[in-house]
Image: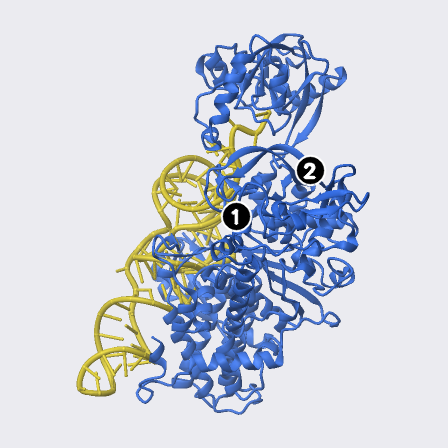
RNA sequence: GCCCCGGUAGCCCAACGGCAGAGGCGAUGGUCUCAAACACCAUGCAGUGUGGGUUCGAAUCCCACCCGGGGCACCA
């Protein structure tokens, strides 16, 4: 493939040397540095950002796609006259580097920074218009110093705290995981089955922002992919309901349950407490304690995966105590079961088997009563085994009787509870606090010192950053506690408060903390007075366009939104949503399946670039499909892209008019198409319909080829105008060939800095249009008419047409629909 | 089970409620060639997943279903 473009030169049509062109323009761009963002520019500012990569090896096809798409937008904005901030960096803390370090007996930084250099070189080759002066790495002490600073600020505000609770534990990576990192009961990263451990860990109080994380989504919802918005809403999981207090014998405090159906309180026939909650252990009667403990043992052995199987039969144990229904005074048995979750709501529920399927399944398993209190017209759940959850008439429900509407029933029930002081309307969220501690080495150290007499002491700001020690190789082997705990020279310190012997917190932060604020730092990467310069951030504002993979639909995007809101509340920035618009690109697959080593279907980016050139690969990725769709590499044709680019390039050599020739008076048809293409391309880029934009450029190339060969000829100024337009439009996608064409057309570099071509509205007006005449909705004739024709004239023309008359065949015309100048429909 | 998104030609994909086809891949034929590759030219009978409905007119809007992808899921 590679040699095709250099051999047989005499017999081949003219082609350009892809490799030489790439080398040439890399040097020119290096020298001219056309993409540096000027903080002080008077131009309107735009911030374009693509998710920064983790440096594992070289770039792959997925990176190639996201960068190509992102670059189209950033380059387009630049041509439209905006001052564009378009930075790049690395999310460079993380486990792969640590595992490599153990394997190779080295420091994780070695692997990390070597890969960063590899990726940086690939990005340069890939022709991306980044402002390299703003490059950052989250593993640099200058960066993580501010991660630590933010942690301490969050802690001051009560938003970072430590508590002991059962946490997700990955036995393979030997670290805890956030809820978001557990997928179907397995570690999101390595796939190992996650177990539970009771550990004291650091959390960010994301729950305090649950409501705003939900409602602020509305601000960006129409510029974010639907599925991301939905995924975040699902994840936050807001529900409205009530807390209801049940007095329990032998306990001073009532037990509070959370329910979304307080209106069914009269149908409650038992209560269920999460078996693994402290409450269950506390409530259980002496007589039932052995049975309870046996049950607890049984469910602890079950993995999350088993627990998650929703079709599993219900299990549980009677705790041997009773609770009192606050509205009826009825005594209800209290059970413990694993179908009630300890960490959702209050960890206890009132069971209304008639109107909740899970409760009904449980009631049937243990022969507990089922009492219908809402008559929906469906069969009685006690008989059918199917709980009814819809609207209906309330029965046996005291003051609710007579109501027929669920919403009314719920609000009345809450009134009753509130009047009696035994319950209150409330809102509940599925979202949990963000567990941020990790028992690994290659991450940002938590800047806390544990002192036996002073407790948790923050590291004083002037001692930040708390830098990682020089551990390597076997020192980093996972052993269930952070490798830092064993580094005694590092961990043993004097307490900053009392000066006594103390220990550093030896955990590191989840790497998602690092990436929750990097986009803010890019506005002032060298700033030393804080994580970012608030003035610069005010200048640039929130990210106008974020581009990235949707595997982060919940994780990174939710965390970054949380950080932004907290910083807003701290008065450090003036927006509440970090990413105004989000473009989520699909995945590059091969032969219908995800690329993987085991399937042997991987496509190596470097090899593709060697074979077809950067431009052809970029064009292929942009043209393949709408950006959100997956691309199957087996369905696309980089060689086809390469052919097209050669065709486009060849045009630039055909132009014989001089640079600067006035196109006025050039071939009207070609000029019209050129200007329509410019207009459409702008609209298509703004709508992120890059594949269609490329198709339009292809059309223009085809039309220009025709004009040169069999039309107005190469000397016509319209040809120059068309070819210059092709170069400018292509510069968004294929910068190398665009520069080469631009230069060949007699212009100075770089085409990337040329303003977007002006559209002449006069050229958009068509000389004539084809009007379609339908009879009964079927096309019977076409008329060439003036675009300004009025309805009556068009109707008359249509009815006079011989083909139309033939189609009408003398039938009576009942109605004529006219949409001048394009359509007439005659109804008979 | 609930919630999103999508089904158009062999394939990837276009089409303000108005001619089903813009672009590409592949295929086929031709020009060039001793032959081939390259290049160039030409060739599109799918009626838009299925069934209803609204409309003068539906790929497009509405309803139901089927298929594919994604999210949530014992969350009370």
Distance from Cα at disc 2 to Cα at disc 1: 25 Å
Q: Which residue is mark 1?
A: A477
Chain (yellow): B
Relative side of A686 to A100, left or right? right
Residue A328 is drawn in which quadrant?
top right
Chain containing the residue with disc 2: A
Residue A660 is drawn in which quadrant?
bottom right
Residue A380 in sight: no
Position of A421 relative to A640 (above/below):
above
Residue A496 in sight: yes
Q: Nearer the viewer, residue A391 or A510?
A: A510
Chain (blue): A
Describe the element under mark 1 as helix, strand or loop. loop
Chain containing the residue with disc 1: A
Position of A490 relative to A244 (above/below):
below
Q: Which residue is mark 2?
A: A162
Residue A808, given in percent of the width and then of the height, sits at 36, 57
Position of A410 relative to A118 (above/below):
above
Q: Nearer the viewer, residue A724 or A824?
A: A724
Residue A193, given in percent of the width and then of the height, sits at 46, 37
Crowding near pointer 1: few (<14 within 10 Å), some, many (20+)? many
Describe the element under mark 2 as helix, strand or loop. strand
Residue A278, given in percent of the width and then of the height, sits at 62, 22
Q: Nearer the viewer, residue A461 or A613?
A: A461
Q: Residue at x 53, y 80 (%)?
A: A25
Q: Which mark is residue A652?
A: none
Residue A734, given in percent of the width and then of the height, sits at 49, 73
Relative side of A559 to B73, left or right? right
Is the C-beta separation of discs 2 and 1 under 8 Å? no
């Amino acid at each position: 493939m590679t040699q095709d473009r250099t051999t047989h030169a005499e017999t081949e049509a003219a082609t350009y040397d892809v490799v030489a062109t790439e080398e040439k323009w890399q040097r020119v761009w290096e020298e001219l540095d056309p993409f540096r963002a000027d903080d002080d520019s008077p131009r309107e500012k735009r911030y374009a950002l693509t998710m920064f990569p983790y440096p594992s090896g070289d770039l792959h096809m997925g990176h190639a796609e996201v960068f190509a798409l992102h670059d189209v937008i950033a380059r387009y904005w630049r041509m439209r006259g905006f001052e564009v901030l378009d930075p790049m960096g690395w999310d460079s803390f993380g486990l792969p580097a640590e595992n490599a370090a153990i394997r190779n007996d080295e420091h994780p930084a070695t692997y990390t920074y070597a890969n960063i250099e590899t990726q940086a070189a690939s990005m340069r080759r890939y022709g991306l218009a980044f402002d390299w002066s703003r490059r950052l790495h989250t593993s640099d002490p200058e960066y993580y110093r501010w991660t630590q600073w933010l942690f301490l600020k969050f802690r001051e505000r009560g938003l970072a705290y430590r508590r002991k609770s059962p946490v997700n534990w990955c036995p393979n990576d030997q670290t805890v995981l956030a809820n978001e990192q557990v997928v179907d009961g397995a570690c999101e990263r390595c796939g190992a089955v996650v177990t539970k451990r009771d550990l004291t860990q650091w959390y960010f109080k994301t729950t305090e922002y649950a409501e705003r994380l939900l409602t602020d989504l509305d601000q960006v919802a129409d510029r974010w992919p639907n599925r991301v918005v939905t995924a975040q809403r699902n994840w936050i999981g807001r529900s409205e309901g009530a807390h209801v207090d049940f007095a329990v014998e032998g306990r001073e405090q009532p037990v509070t349950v959370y329910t979304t159906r307080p209106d069914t309180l009269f149908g409650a026939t038992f209560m269920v407490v999460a078996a693994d909650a402290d409450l269950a252990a506390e409530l259980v009667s002496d007589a039932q304690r052995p049975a309870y403990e046996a049950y607890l043992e049984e469910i602890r052995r079950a993995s999350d995966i088993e627990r998650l199987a929703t079709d599993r039969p219900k299990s549980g144990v009677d705790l041997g105590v009773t609770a009192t229904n606050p509205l009826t005074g009825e005594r209800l048995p209290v059970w413990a079961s694993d179908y009630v979750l300890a960490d959702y709501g209050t960890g206890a529920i009132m069971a209304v088997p008639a109107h909740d399927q899970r409760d009904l399944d449980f009631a049937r398993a243990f022969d507990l009563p089922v009492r219908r209190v809402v008559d929906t017209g469906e069969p009685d759940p006690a008989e059918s085994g199917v709980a009814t959850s819809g609207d209906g008439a309330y029965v046996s429900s005291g003051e609710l009787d007579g109501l027929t509407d669920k919403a009314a029933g719920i609000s009345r029930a809450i009134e009753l509870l509130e009047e009696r002081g035994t319950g209150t309307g409330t809102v509940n969220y599925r979202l949990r606090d963000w567990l941020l501690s990790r028992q690994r080495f290659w991450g940002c150290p938590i800047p806390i010192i544990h002192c036996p007499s002073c407790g948790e002491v923050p590291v004083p700001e002037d001692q930040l950053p708390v830098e990682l020690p020089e551990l390597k190789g076997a020192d980093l082997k996972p052993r269930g506690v952070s490798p830092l705990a064993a580094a005694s020279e590092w961990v043993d310190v004097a307490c900053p408060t009392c000066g006594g012997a103390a220990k550093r917190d030896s955990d590191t932060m989840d790497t998602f903390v690092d990436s929750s604020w990097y986009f803010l730092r890019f506005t002032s990467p060298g700033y030393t007075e804080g994580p970012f310069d608030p003035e610069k951030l005010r200048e640039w504002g929130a990210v106008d366009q974020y581009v990235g993979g949707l595997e982060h639909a919940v994780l990174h995007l939710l965390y970054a939104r949380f950080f932004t809101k907290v910083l807003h509340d701290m008065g450090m920035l003036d927006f509440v949503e970090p990413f105004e618009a989000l473009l989520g690109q699909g995945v590059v697959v091969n032969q219908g399946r995800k690329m993987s080593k085991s399937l042997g279907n991987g496509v190596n980016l470097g090899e593709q670039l060697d074979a077809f050139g950067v431009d052809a690969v970029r064009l292929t990725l942009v043209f393949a499909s709408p950006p959100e769709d997956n691309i199957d590499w087996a369905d696309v044709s980089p060689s086809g892209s390469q052919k097209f680019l050669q065709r486009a390039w060849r045009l630039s050599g055909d132009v014989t008019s001089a640079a600067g020739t006035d196109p006025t008076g050039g071939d009207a048809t070609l000029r019209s198409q050129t200007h329509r293409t410019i207009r459409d391309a702008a609209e298509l880029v703004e709508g992120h319909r890059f594949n269609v934009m490329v198709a339009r450029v292809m059309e223009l190339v085809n039309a220009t080829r025709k004009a040169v060969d069999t039309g107005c000829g190469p000397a016509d100024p319209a040809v120059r105008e068309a070819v210059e337009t092709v170069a400018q439009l292509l510069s968004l996608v294929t910068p190398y060939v665009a520069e080469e064409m631009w230069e060949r057309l007699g212009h100075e570099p770089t085409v990337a800095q040329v303003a977007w071509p002006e559209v002449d509205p006069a050229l958009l007006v068509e000389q004539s249009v084809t009007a379609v005449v339908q009879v009964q909705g079927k096309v019977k004739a076409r008329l060439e008419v003036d675009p300004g024709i009025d309805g009556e004239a068009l109707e008359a023309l249509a009815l006079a047409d011989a083909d139309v008359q033939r189609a009408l065949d003398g039938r009576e015309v009942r109605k004529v629909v006219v949409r001048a100048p394009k359509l007439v429909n005659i109804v008979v």
